[in-house]
Image: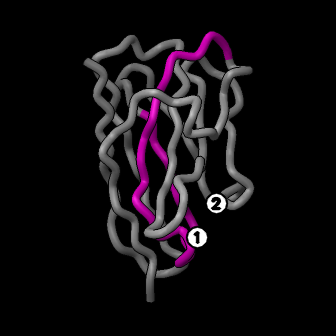
Amino acid sequence: QVQLVESGGGSVHPGGSLRLSCLASGVPYRGNCIGWFRQAPGKEREGVASIYTNGGSPYYADSVKGRFTISQDNAKNTVWLQMNNLKPDDTAMYLCAANFCPGISWLSLSTADFVYWGQGTQVTVSS
């Protein structure tokens, strides 16, 4: 059974930082696309960043480029999302998602391309 468990959310002031983690279990870690998504109340779920567990360049939404960094530790089956210079618009539930990827060309930020989802961790940015 595939499980994705997120942690690291919280409340910060604008300009602050948080690091989210996603622990994947129940599936071979290698050969997957793992993504971070977010959903604010009343808004559609949107992709933030994704990474191919076999390596290669990650994929970022324009809204977070230069502020967020996705990284991974294969030995720990963990993907992180380092979020810097947070803004109130970044307030949302952040969810980790995964799916098998035949190759890095399959990397995307579309919710339709991910099968397995975690429960999410809340990020609130306010003054």
Left or right: residue 37 compared with residue 116: right
Return the residue nearer the eye: 53 or 120.
120
Q: Amino acid at mark 1?
A: Asn
Q: Which stretch is magenta? A: 79-103
Q: Amino acid at mark 2?
A: Arg
- Assess whether mark 1 and mark 2 are in contact (beta carbons under 8 angstroms): yes
* 114 to 118, vertically: above or below: above
Label 1: state its secondary structure. loop
Return the residue nearer the eye: 95 or 22.
95
Which residue carries the number 2 mark? 67
Residue at the location (43% across, 54% down)?
94
Q: Residue 79: x, y in percent?
A: 45, 35
Residue positioned most to the bottom: 127
Left or right: residue 120 compared with residue 63: left
N-term-proximal mark, 2 vs 1:
2
Q: Residue 97: x, y in percent?
A: 45, 35
Return the residue nearer the eye: 84 or 89.
89
Q: Is residue 80 magenta?
A: yes
**Spatial distance from mark 2 to mark 1, Cα to Cα?**
6 Å
Which residue carries the number 1 mark? 85
